[in-house]
Image (cartoon, grey):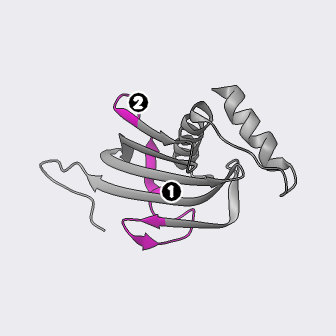
Amino acid sequence: MTAAIFALGAASQGNAETAHHCDRTCMTALVDQYLAALVKHDPAGLPLDKGVRFTENTATIHVGDGLWVGASEAPTTFKIYTVDPATEQVAFYGVMKEWDKPLIIALRLKLANGRITEIEHVLAAICGPTACRTW
């Protein structure tokens, strides 16, 4: 998995004419890298395209806002990855924590030449007896 992330990072350092195809292993590793960056509240190490489009619950926002602010724990047990190497998209469904409260996340990343061009989050609170996240 680390080799896949390294390969993706190395490809993103090259010139724009160098096409990079991220395979199934690479795309799964990229989701894990993305989720770790969310929890660190720091997208700096991600191969983001200059014009990356980011939506959360259908609203277009800036990378660094929304879940980037409150993510407190990456998914640890319940994780489903759906990878489509032909269209260079990967989807993820799992449970993580925001402000130390459980949250269901559906995530989609779209790549082009080894760079993330689209990020989509759909979030749903797992309501407890006293509170739910409000958007």
- The quarter of the rendered structure image containing the N terminus is top right
Do labels 2 and 1 touch, CB within 8 Å?
Answer: no
Up/down of 70 relative to 80, above or below: below
Q: Residue at left 41%, top 30%?
A: 76
Magenta region = 55-80
Judge left or right: residue 2 versus residue 102. right
Q: Residue at left 68%, top 35%?
A: 5
Judge left or right: residue 59 versus residue 113. left
Q: Which mark is residue 46?
A: none
Up/down of 59 relative to 83, above or below: below
Residue with the mark numbered 1:
68
Q: Which mark is residue 76?
A: 2
Label 2 environment density (alpha carbons within 10 Å; few <14, some 14–19, many ≥20) = few
Residue 123 lies, in percent from the top left, at 33, 56
Instruction: Please name the amino acid that badge 2 sits on.
Output: Thr
Any magenta on residue 79? Answer: yes
Judge left or right: residue 116 versus residue 99. right
Judge left or right: residue 15 versus residue 54. right
Tell me where residue 74 sits by quadrant. top left
Residue 71 lies, in percent from the top left, at 45, 49
Instruction: Please name the amino acid that badge 1 sits on.
Output: Trp
